Amino acid sequence: MLKVAIVGATGYTGRELVHILLRHPHARPYYLTSESFAGQKISDVYPQFRQLCDLPLEKLDLEKVAQCDFIFAALPHGTSVNTVPQLLQTGKKVVDLSGDFRLQDAAMYPQWYGYEHTAPELLQQSVYGLPEVNRVEIAKATLVANPGCYPTGVQLALFPLLAEGVVESEDIIIDAKSGVSGAGRTPKQALHFPECTENFKAYKVTGHQHIPEMEQGLSRAAGRPVTLLFTPHLVPMIRGILSTIYLRVKPLVTEALIGEIYTKYYENEAFIRLLPSPELPETKNVSGTNFCDLAYRLDQRTGRLIVISAIDNLVKGAAGQAVQNMNIMQGWPETAGLQ
Amino acid sequence: MLKVAIVGATGYTGRELVHILLRHPHARPYYLTSESFAGQKISDVYPQFRQLCDLPLEKLDLEKVAQCDFIFAALPHGTSVNTVPQLLQTGKKVVDLSGDFRLQDAAMYPQWYGYEHTAPELLQQSVYGLPEVNRVEIAKATLVANPGCYPTGVQLALFPLLAEGVVESEDIIIDAKSGVSGAGRTPKQALHFPECTENFKAYKVTGHQHIPEMEQGLSRAAGRPVTLLFTPHLVPMIRGILSTIYLRVKPLVTEALIGEIYTKYYENEAFIRLLPSPELPETKNVSGTNFCDLAYRLDQRTGRLIVISAIDNLVKGAAGQAVQNMNIMQGWPETAGLQ
Amino acid sequence: MLKVAIVGATGYTGRELVHILLRHPHARPYYLTSESFAGQKISDVYPQFRQLCDLPLEKLDLEKVAQCDFIFAALPHGTSVNTVPQLLQTGKKVVDLSGDFRLQDAAMYPQWYGYEHTAPELLQQSVYGLPEVNRVEIAKATLVANPGCYPTGVQLALFPLLAEGVVESEDIIIDAKSGVSGAGRTPKQALHFPECTENFKAYKVTGHQHIPEMEQGLSRAAGRPVTLLFTPHLVPMIRGILSTIYLRVKPLVTEALIGEIYTKYYENEAFIRLLPSPELPETKNVSGTNFCDLAYRLDQRTGRLIVISAIDNLVKGAAGQAVQNMNIMQGWPETAGLQ
Amino acid sequence: MLKVAIVGATGYTGRELVHILLRHPHARPYYLTSESFAGQKISDVYPQFRQLCDLPLEKLDLEKVAQCDFIFAALPHGTSVNTVPQLLQTGKKVVDLSGDFRLQDAAMYPQWYGYEHTAPELLQQSVYGLPEVNRVEIAKATLVANPGCYPTGVQLALFPLLAEGVVESEDIIIDAKSGVSGAGRTPKQALHFPECTENFKAYKVTGHQHIPEMEQGLSRAAGRPVTLLFTPHLVPMIRGILSTIYLRVKPLVTEALIGEIYTKYYENEAFIRLLPSPELPETKNVSGTNFCDLAYRLDQRTGRLIVISAIDNLVKGAAGQAVQNMNIMQGWPETAGLQ
């Protein structure tokens, strides 16, 4: 059994990694680090794990990391960038769940993440971990930058259409809606239950740090620069992201052609489900799973294509995709531990 | 005190009308009809009214309606169209909360509402009841067609911008999100609590019957035909609609100019609140009120304008606006009973 | 119009006081204090008040308090005890919403509230503000100690039964369930939306600080010491408290007699609704109101009486009751501003 | 792989059975019946199963049942009683999730379930399927009556204490709170999202049909008749049951002794977690699992013992326990497919 280290195990994505790995046929959680909760057990922080996993939480000790076989880093943005280089020095493979190694261009980091990148050379080495697009490179990678939650649902929805050139690369509008776990574990006024429930709102209306990541991947798919308009919203639910994406189709493109393209790209993908009309994605149908559900409608009246995708932000949007990447990097079936 | 009849008092909008009128200084609920609950009291159907309103519910009796001074019809679409003509014959003013008298063109009804309009002549007489746009005509009306919930938040957001010609009338995209009370009182599988909570989804992705109503009003504002792309979504909350609207601005239009236009149109409007940056609308801030909160952002990267509006679907989106219309028709302050 | 000061206006009960007073026929919010938000407006902290109340928030200035006509103190326990004596020196009447003046016996404070009472002499002066029990003394009071939320629903349910001696004063068990706003405005891990929603639990299983307050009032009613078992629980909703109370009836007591007693005590009470069988209280039916809904069942199999009460923790459990007390102290109808 | 038939696969417990069996190492869903949805696939009714399980739903055909190896009946009360005898004739073992075979005394059925039992002889044969109490008989059973949801959490909490005689068998009070999935899949007004969310209430205040089942099991444990007072409540969440149980301890019983007894009975139980003080059960910590979390407090002031248990009503309260019973009946590890 592969001994897995989870650096930063007490955020929601860390917890989700532990949860998934406890049922993995070839890997198990072995070493868990936490700065805030060192000295406690993971089941003290998350009582759901009592009698399932009683691993201690420790402050990061690179020697103990080196005794593991595989490393997940689930640290905040701006922290991973300092820690991951040290983790790589153990010689073990690393999947990083932060945004710190997703962008190829180090100059993006000050603008979008608010800090100067301290390990820009690793940006060449890191492989963006979106398996349905990138599994060949992931298989060879030593450092995988696990995609952000919103960018996962968006890029899976748009990659085939831009790659096949059936939609315009301009004027793509993404209206995304996420459950509150995406905001993380730290209590804040806006996430205080009485403020958060029975409420709906947009936030970071322009300038969300997932934009460059999505534009990077979609520009690559389109073969030309893509500029997105992306508006995230907060839904009073724990998990899930639904993205409603508005596209312009090229002339003569029909709904049937769109369907053929999705089928061509995704019919053999274990984790992508193309919903037959009239079904539409609902976040509860992917909740707790590594699936991405997709549907599309061509609006005759306006000629616009609407694509809707649903994922679980903590699974396909984070920990599940991370494990999928580990499976690829280890040469295991991609679905191991995920179905 | 004006004696008010509410025909169809036991749907959610009927209940909301009773709730609002119980605190109105010049009007009170006097006669409540219900086909399903005739013989019970409103407080049997809605125990919140116990000791506040114990009016009986009766099957519609036009003679009793004629003894009232003002009539609200809160019947389903396709039912109002048959009932409202009879209500008008009492000689009393009517505000109809259904969609049956909102569209000027009778030919729209088969396509969008699924029935042939049986009183097309009344479509000339009915006045669309959006006070911030239309109060002069509302004041003279005998039949007011109360706007739909989604169309209210959308038209209030877009009317000034289209009227002033600062945004393109093409390619307007509306991504709307509504609480579940908008779906009405009748239990359905999709609205069953375990199916509905902790879930988010789009529905009626093209073809929602509120589209012609919005296009009618916005075409009038723009002075040219407007075709909208409108996607509604269901939020696991009881009340509220947030609309995120994507527009193209004409050349040289700045965020400041947008602000001036909204200020010009709305600064004296009792029920429209222009939120100062960086505030954004949240449905809970308008919950239970007749307010529409608005904000806007010009996205520099794409040149698109994003306008966000929030209303309470049962208040400004239905019963509150209906009472606001009654106030106008009666020559009272518009805010009577609403603040 | 009475000029009202709200000292500590930015907690949930302070906000609720502002909300209620904005519609009060004889009083209005005039001076609002906040230590945390001094310099902002109440509508900056609570955007629901934009265009309804734009009063500034200021650090407490006793001279400005002295210019008001009536004072509500909505400060945390342990803070009021130091502030209220100063407020009283203005010569104005004070309703205190904390627990600091509810207990007659100063010795209870270290044990239950964790501090030594610094103004024990005021405990003689303060009048416990439960109008349905105590309105004669409230009318003459200069300092009213507004009851706690849980104690309100419990004492209203039990007072008549203990006063009439139809239930045993021993072995009273109260299982109470509250919405999350009762925990206050400060973000905490347990109140973080993802931890709080889709979850139910008990807390403070023995030793809740509302126990001595309830025992004080119910012992007075019974004419003998009453010891309660009280278990609070947290419900994933914003507002409401439902208390399920288990009592032993004295011999020969019937359900009909219980009903007669409740009717005798409460049939003329504006804010207590005795629900006719088979109706049971639901928190949503009292939400936003000053009502307490009551029902009871005598279980034939065990001989136990079950009484269920429902209140809105922020209204009848706090701000609404405080305004009801103010109405009494000012000689106004008790329902002013509350219906 | 054991071929499993699920008769009545489209209720929430049927769906949960499919979900659990899809990950079972030794069994798989093979034949699914549904009267309402015959002709569709399980993934049409529950899209979460798309690409995970596309079994068809068929009207019950006993010949096809006979081709299976094991049978779960997840039919409504009053329906199972007619169907299970036919299922047993296939010679296969049956676990029935309804209440129709839980009570030993056929005379209880008219009073508590509203029908005359049509197969009373099977009541002798059926074994009550609470493994922690009864696994020896379950192992030999051909018909297991799977316990009700509420009775599971209650009996697991009380069995050791009554068996050891440390609590009184009179005056046991159970205040239980359940998520809404326990009410089943059929839409009803009270379960309509807008009526159900942001609301809390009691229901079936006396006379819940789970009472005779709990009294049967606990009387057996105590060796004398036990009469319970049981009050269920509805929580606005999907899953979970928290039971707060009030007991009288015998003289000289301490909290430590209670702990020893629970440890003696449960320390080796895979699915029971005794929470160390000061932890208390929360339904989210058992959500989706077959665990029952337990805690207890001895209230010094009243001498009452409070025991709190939490289960997932669909898992340990239904489908998970059913699979646990199948594991026992098949001679497999009890945890197979459940951890």
Image (cartoon, coloured by chain):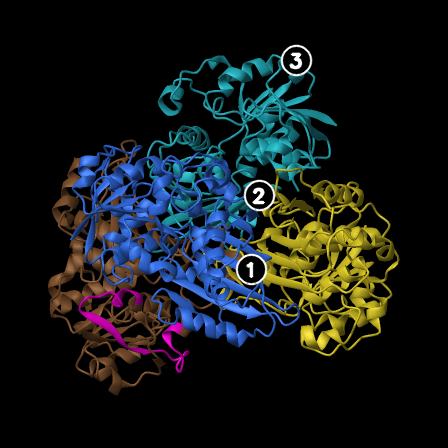
Chain colours: A blue, B yellow, C cyan, D brown
Q: How many angstroms separate mark 3 from mark 1 (CA)?
A: 65 Å
Magenta-colored stretch includes residue D40:
yes
Looking at the rendered image, the disc whose residue lies closer to the viewer, 3 or 1, is 1
Q: Which mark is residue C132?
A: none
Could you say whether the residue bearing mark 3 is in a helix, strand or loop? helix
Magenta-colored stretch includes residue A308:
no
Q: Residues within 10 Å of mark 1 (few under 14, many from 20)?
A: many
Give the chain of mark 1: A
Could you say whether the residue bearing mark 1 is in a helix, strand or loop? loop
Looking at the rendered image, the disc whose residue lies closer to the viewer, 2 or 1, is 1
Q: Is residue C95 left or right of residue A81?
A: right
Are both tags, 2 and 3, on one chain?
yes
Tell me the quarter of the image containing the C terminus of chain A. Answer: bottom left
Q: Is residue A63 left or right of residue B77?
A: left
Give the chain of mark 3: C
Are both tags, 3 and 1, on one chain?
no
Residue C4 versus residue C192 in the image, above or below: above
Residue type highlighted by circle 1: Ser
Q: Which residue is mark 3?
A: C63
Q: How many angstroms separate mark 2 from mark 3 (CA)?
A: 36 Å
**A203 and C70: which is toward the camera:** A203
- Residue at 38% in and 39% down: A120
Residue type highlighted by circle 2: Phe
Q: Residues within 10 Å of mark 3 (few under 14, many from 20)?
A: few
Q: Are marks 2 and 3 in contact (CB under 8 Å)?
A: no
Query: Which image quadrant is residue D74 in?
Result: bottom left
User: How far across and down, in percent of the image, does residue D332 sit?
Assistant: 13, 65
Q: Which residue is mark 1?
A: A169
Write the start and end of the magenta stretch as one range. Answer: D19-43
Q: Which mark is residue C291?
A: 2
Q: How many angstroms separate mark 2 from mark 1 (CA)?
A: 58 Å
**C332 and A122: which is toward the camera:** A122
